[in-house]
Amino acid sequence: MQSSHETTGSLRLSHAGSPQSDGQVFLSGNLTLGENEVHVWMSRLDLGRQATERLRRLLNDDEEARASRFRFERDRDAFAVSRGMLRRLLERYIGERAERIRFEYGPHGKPVIAAERSGHGLRFNLSHSDGVAVFAFASSADVGVDVERVRALADMEEMARHFFSEREFSALRRLPISAREMAFFSCWTAKEAYIKGIGEGLSMPLDRFAVSLGPSEGAIRLRILAGDAAPTPWRLYRFEPCPGYIAAVAAEMRGFRLLRDWLPEKLIL
C-alpha cells in the first residue's frame, strides 16, 4: 500500500483514537493483515472497456445475474468492476484464485467467504458511489465500510428527520446551511458503515444509535441509544478518499490501525 498523501511505498497509519504514524506494506506476493489492523483500498471504477471486461470474467453466475438487473450500463459496470476488484484483493489475502472464490450471504445480504475457505478468519466489506469504490479488510473481526459522493439532495432535511436520531438531527440543524451537505453524508456513511459491519443492513433502525457528525477525518463517536445497552466494542473512523467524497469504516475492535491507499492497477489486472 502507499498513501495518497506521501511518497510511493509509504503508508499512513491512522490509529483510531491515537496519534498517527508511518509504516510500510509491500505489494509483492500476498497481502497480510497485522494484528488489530484494518486495510482500506480505494479505486476509481471507470477503468475502460478492456479492464472492465477482464474483471467481469471473474464473476460467477449469481454475480452476473445481479449485474444484469441494473437498468443502466454504468451501474452494471460499476457492480461488475467492484466485485471483480474484490475478488482480486481476496485472492491476494487468502491465496485462492479470484474466479474460484465462493461467497455465502447473511440474512441481510452481507457477503462472507464460503465456509470451506473461512479458516483464515478474513472479514471484508465494500461500497461504491458514483465511480469510486472502497474495500475494507480485517482479520477475525467484523468490518463495514461506506462511501458517498457529497451532493445536493432536495429532500436532505426530510431524510435526516426520518433516519437520524434526534441528537444527530439537532446537530445537523445547528450547522450553517453551507456545511450541512458534508455533515449529512458524514453522518450517513458512518451509520451505514456500522450497520453493514454488524450485518443488519437497513433492518436496524438508524435512529437507535448516534454518531458524531465531525470531523471530516478522524475517529467517530458512537453511542447506542437503548437505555440498557452495554458499551459497544465497535470503533469507527471517517476519511475523505478524494475531493467531493466522504467515507467511513467500522470495525468490531476496541482500537485498530487503519491502513489505506489507492489500489494500484497492477494489483487487480
Image: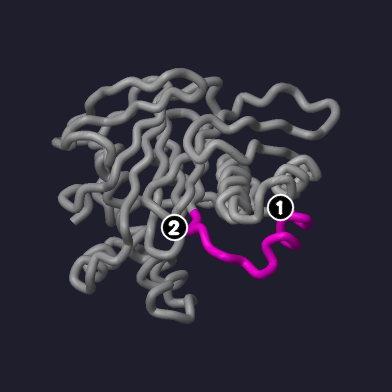
- Nearest the viewer among 243 and 57 is 243
Q: In the rendered view, does 261 fall on the left or right side of 189?
A: left
- Nearest the viewer among 31 and 194 is 194
| 233 drawn magenta | no
**Looking at the picture, how far across and down is residue 43, in whole percent?**
31, 53
Under circle 2, the secondary element is strand
- Residue sitting at x 24%, y 49%: 97
Q: In the rendered view, does 188 fall on the left or right side of 70?
A: right
| 160 drawn magenta | yes
**Looking at the picture, how far across and down is residue 252, in whole percent?**
55, 29
- Residue sitting at x 77%, y 40%: 167
Residue receiving disc 2 = 128
State whether residue 128 is above or below residue 197: below
- Nearest the viewer among 168 and 117 is 168
- Decide if residue 217 is in sight here: yes
- Nearest the viewer among 116 and 233 is 233
Q: In the rendered view, does 128 fall on the left or right side of 188?
A: left
Q: Earlier in the sequence, mark 1 or mark 2?
A: 2
Q: In the rendered view, does 257 fall on the left or right side of 9?
A: right
Q: Amino acid at mark 1?
A: Ser
Q: Which residues are magenta?
A: 148-163
**Looking at the picture, how far across and down is residue 116, in whole percent?**
40, 41
State whether residue 226 is above or below residue 85: above
Residue receiving disc 1 = 203
| Dot 1 alpha-carbon crowd within 10 angstroms: few under 14, some 14 to 19, many 20 or more | few
State whether residue 195 is above or below residue 57: above
- Residue sitting at x 48%, y 59%: 149
**Looking at the picture, how far across and down is residue 211, in whole percent?**
66, 37
Give the number of the mark in front: 1 or 2.
Answer: 2
